[in-house]
Image: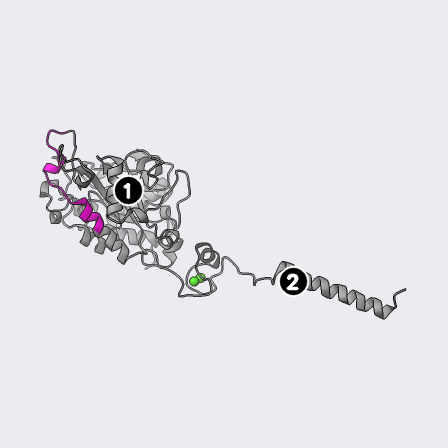
Amino acid sequence: MMSVSLRSSFVALILTFSLFFAGCLGGVEPPVIDPNADSDGDGLPNGYELEVGLNPDDSTDAPTCQGRVEFCLQTYDNFTFAETHNSFATSEDGVLYLAANHDTGLTPQWNGGIRAYMLDTHHKSATETSKEDVVFCHGDPDQSLHPCEYSEVDAFAWLTQLSSYMNESPNDVVSILLENYVPIDHLENLFNQTGLLDRTWVRTAGEEWPTLGEMVLSNHSLVVFWDEGDDPQYPWLHHAWTHSWDTPYGEDEQDEMSCDVGRGDREQPVWHLNNWLSNPLGLSDSQRAEQVNDKETLLARAIECWEEVGNRPTFIAVDWWEDGDVVGVTEELNLMQNWTASAPE
Ligand SMILES: [Ca+2]
Ligand SMILES: [Ca+2]
């Protein structure tokens, strides 16, 4: 028979051992971190910081996205970017006024806050068709006159400049929508040569869109869409009308503008609100740009469509971006949680 004292010592020893081994096997319990709390007060919840590899206890470890820390939490499809239609077709780029869509080129557009660009890739002419001959032009290649007869813009220089702006502002997310008339490998060469290919975000159809923070922190802050189908060999080229949709464009009258589907899959959360008019010659109407791009007018249209569609426009695309205030409209929208809210003063 074990004495009482000996038995107590034995129990104590067992307890000590079990506690000791429990400690060894289970490790020291880390302090519980509330994923919804913001321990360092930088505007990002702890859970998000851990998910994207930031330090939830260091307020200096917090990026800004599109100029604000909290925008990093927004998903790509829940943010609104100002977009220029035929971004390269500008008087500043030497494009004839009749064929132009804007007065000013990439630098003023970038500095003014445009972060989405619609670009048309063609070969220089019917005989200059190598991968080095890819340029931006606007027009129908089936017409007797090649579209680059009107004017051509150096696509390599243009995208290299964009790449350099993205290097200077790595926390901004940029999108490109291509209307393409060249072989797919010529596009890949163009994006590779200009340093943009490595920055592209790749999305498989049906996947959730990432937060702006994920895109910025992974250095894949460029989304490229094109008007042809998805190709598994070129996953960075997203078929625009599988991954997004747009409203009709180039209406004759302002009251014909709608929130209806022009092209693409209406079920997709990413969409373009197209907002430019055609003149009686079928060209981009500079005369009424001030009217349709007017801040109050365009904001009202965007909010109306946001409500009708059920989610905010991802892009608001305009011609003559210098007229009115498309960038101001997107800034207001991005401060709104939903279409019934008003932007904070
Ligand atoms: Ca935080
Ligand atoms: Ca932090």
Coordinates of residue 246 in the picture (x, y in percent): 29, 38
The residue sitting at the bottom extreme is: 5
**Residue lying at 22% horizontally and 48% vertically, measured from the top left:** 159
Q: Tell me the kind of residue under disc 1.
A: Leu
Q: Nearer the viewer, residue 318 or 243?
A: 243
Is residue 148 located in the magenta-colored stretch of the structure?
A: yes
**Residue lying at 57% horizontally and 62% vertically, measured from the top left:** 30
User: Which residue carries the number 2 mark?
Assistant: 23
Residue 203 badge:
none
Mark 2 or 1: in front is 2
Residue 273 badge:
1
In the picture provided, is 6 more to the left or to the right than 249? Answer: right
Q: Is residue 276 above or below residue 41?
A: above
| Distance CA(mark 2)–CA(mark 1) | 59 Å
Q: Where's the C terminus, which quadrant?
A: bottom left
Quadrant for ligand 1 reads bottom left
Q: Where's the N terminus, which quadrant?
A: bottom right
Coordinates of residue 4 in the picture (x, y in percent): 86, 68
**In terms of image quadrants, where is residue 251?**
top left
* Residue 325 appearing in the image: no
Q: Are marks 2 and 1 in contact (CB under 8 Å)?
A: no
* Residue 165 appearing in the image: yes
Q: Tell me the kind of residue under disc 2.
A: Gly
Give, as a single range, the part of the protein colored magenta: 143-160
Per the image, label 2 sits on a secondary structure element best described as helix
Q: Nearer the viewer, residue 82 or 60?
A: 60
